[in-house]
Image: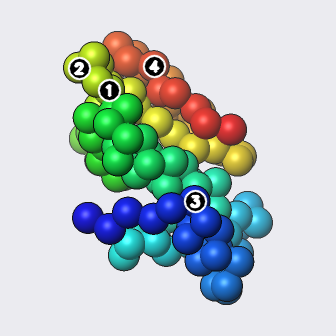
Amino acid sequence: MEHWSIEDYNNYKNTNNFKKTKYKANKTSIDGHTFDSQKEADYYIELKLKLQAKEIKGFCLQPTFILAPGLKYKADFVVFNSDNSYEVIDVKGFKTKEYIAKKKVFEDKYNLKIKEIE
């Protein structure tokens, strides 16, 4: 796994072109992963640094949860904490009606809260 310093990441961010999405977010690719926004990519870098510093045990990208037949929710991250707990993370710049509805179904079905990073 490749690790970047904050300086390396900022250099990367400042020298690459980013494609705008529907909500004016910058699609960004890092380590072969494409993120829907610069904010989500920044959080990924933060998680990599926390992992390197052994502040967390690990994380996974864009896990998919089945809410009902034909209905899925894709979180941005699941973070595995050092105390063996975990958090479902969604990095949000804009909350769509679809997201709000899926969040409610997810939280009811799995009895877990989604931690929103705004």
Q: CA distance from mark 3 to mark 1?
A: 22 Å
Mark 3 and mark 1 lie on one chain; the one further toward the N terminus is 3
Mark 2 and mark 3 lie on one chain; the one further toward the N terminus is 3
Closer to the camera in the image, 8 or 101: 8
Q: Amino acid at mark 2?
A: Asn
Residue under the point 64% across and 54% down:
39
Mark 3 and mark 4 lie on one chain; the one further toward the N terminus is 3
Give the crowd class for mark 3: few <14, some 14-19, many >=20 residues within 10 Å. few
Closer to the camera in the image, 90 or 68: 90
Foreground mark, 3 or 1, reads: 3
Taking 85 as reference, is 73 above or below it? below
Q: Are marks 3 and 4 in contact (CB under 8 Å)?
A: no
- Residue 113 numbered mark, or none: 4
- Name the element at disc 4: loop
Task: Kindly indicate the quadrant of the structure image that contains residue 65.
Answer: top left
Query: What residue is shown with label 1?
Result: 81
* Residue 71 visible (yes or no): no
Residue under the point 35% across and 13% down:
111
Q: Are marks 2 and 1 in contact (CB under 8 Å)?
A: yes
Residue under the point 38% across and 27% down:
87
Q: CA distance from mark 2 to mark 4?
A: 16 Å
Foreground mark, 2 or 3, reads: 3
Closer to the camera in the image, 25 or 40: 40
Mark 2 and mark 4 lie on one chain; the one further toward the N terminus is 2
Q: Which quarter of the figure is the N terminus placed in?
A: bottom left
Q: Amino acid at mark 3?
A: Ile
Residue under the point 58% across and 32% down:
116
Q: Amino acid at mark 4?
A: Lys
Query: What residue is shown with label 2?
Result: 84
Taking 58 as reference, is 24 above or below it? below
Mark 1 and mark 4 lie on one chain; the one further toward the N terminus is 1
- Residue 6 numbered mark, or none: 3
